[in-house]
Amino acid sequence: MYLVTITIKTKKIAKEDEDDLLRRHRAWFTDQFDKGNFLIVGPYKDKGMAGIAIAKAGDRARLDKILSQDAYYPDYATYDVSEFQANLIANHLSDYKGQ
């Protein structure tokens, strides 16, 4: 499993492109969630234009391919990825324990 932090480079985005990029970004992460690749998605509350996804993508190469489909990729966001093993999980998420 992977923890992905996505930080949008707002200073690089033209004002007239902001709404379209954000709409496409939201559609992308919703699609990945619906496909089961992202288990949890949400914005940081204490950081502007940044958020996280908990991803179950099989391997890093597959995750990189998924990330490359984001509207902000590669020039308008940074994607910090850390692989982790889920050992303690709330009961309703127990299907993913150990992955």
Image (cartoon, rainbow, N blue to C red):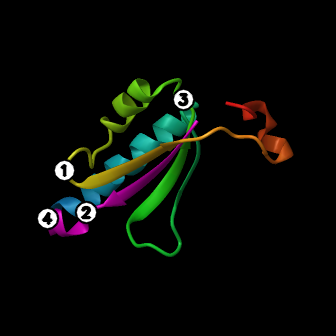
Label 3 sits on what residue type? Answer: Lys
Residue at the image position 19 percent from the left and 69 percent from the top? 11
Q: Which residue is mark 2?
A: 9
Label 4 sits on what residue type? Answer: Ala
Horizontal side of 21 relative to 6 (left or right) equals left
Q: Position of residue 5 (x, y in %)?
A: 44, 54
Q: Which residue is mark 4?
A: 14
Of callouts 2 and 4, the N-terminal one: 2
Discs 1/4, front: 1
Residue at the image position 44 percent from the left and 45 percent from the top? 81
Q: Which mark is residue 35?
A: 3
Could you give the CA–CA distance between mark 3 and mark 2, rounded to whole angstroms? 27 Å
- Number of callouts in the render? 4
Could you give the CA–CA distance between mark 3 and mark 1, rounded to whole angstroms? 25 Å
Could you give the CA–CA distance between mark 2 and mark 1, rounded to whole angstroms? 8 Å
Query: Quick one: SS at disc 3?
Result: loop
Q: Which quadrant, please, contains the C terminus?
A: top right
Instruction: Let me know if residue 10 is in the magenta part.
Output: yes
Q: Is residue 66 above or below residue 22?
A: above
Query: Quick one: SS at disc 4?
Result: loop
Of callouts 1 and 4, the N-terminal one: 4
Q: Quadrant of residue 38?
A: top right
Discs 2/4, front: 2
Callout 2 touching callout 1 (CB < 8 Å): yes
Q: Which residue is mark 1?
A: 75
